[in-house]
Amino acid sequence: MTEAYISRRRGEVDMPLKSLRHFAESLRLIRLELSSNDGPPESSLGAIISLAIHATLIGNLDESRIHLNALKHIIENRASGLNGLCADAPEVGNKVRRTDLDLALMAGTPTLFGSHSVSPAIPYVVPLNLRERNVSHE
């Protein structure tokens, strides 16, 4: 992913051969896991979201949206949906939400997952007036 991003920043249009090989292998492994009867594990969802992030990094917003749409379809077919994913694997769930928001902001479009499907965070307020007083008065 890094090599492809650096190549893009240098003005190179084509994806480096090494990156293309890794991309094709990623797609092959994801397809293999998607075809299983158990449904894809969180690691596959992480790989799909990484493909969306990669597409966004190189400026291919249409490809990023394709990956996010596929991910949305997979997550909607899970019994627990996005809320369950965020509870079971918060690092993957949060990455999905951040990438969705990032793409929406870059493309000027609504988010795919929307805010209604995300459970509200439990507010945690840090009191500012509490300080430990460990100063001895000698």
Image: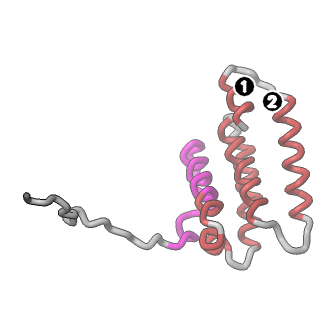
Q: Seen in the image, is 27 located left or right of residue 73? A: right
Which of the 4 image quadrants contains residue 132? bottom left
The answer to if 9 sits in the magenta stretch is no
**Disc 2, SS:** loop
Judging by the rendered image, the residue that carries numbered circle 2 is 15
Residue holding disc 1: 7
- For image coordinates 53% across by 73% down, the residue present is 119
Could you tell me residue 138's position as x and y percent?
7, 58
- The residue furthest left is 138
**Count of numbered circles on the image:** 2
Check disc 1 and report its element: helix, strand or loop. helix
Q: Quadrant of residue 117?
A: bottom right
Query: Residue type at mark 1?
Result: Ser
On the image, the x and y values in percent for residue 56 come to: 66, 41
Residues under labels 1 and 2: Cα distance? 8 Å
Sequence order check, earlier mark of 1 and 2: 1
Which residue is at 86% across, 50% downward? 27
Query: Can the viewer see residue 110 in this picture?
Result: no
Q: Which mark is residue 26?
A: none
Amino acid carrying mark 2 in the image: Met
Q: Quick check: 104 above or below 83? A: above
Q: Using residue 97 as the reference point, say whether residue 133 is left or right of it.
A: left
Which residue is at 48% across, 72% downward?
120
Q: Is residue 118 magenta?
A: yes
Outermost front residue: 138
Tell me whether the residue at label 1 lies in contact with that at label 2, contact meaning CB atoms closer than 8 angstroms. Answer: yes
Residue 89 lies, in percent from the top left, at 65, 67
Query: Over which residues does the magenta segment extend?
Result: 95-119
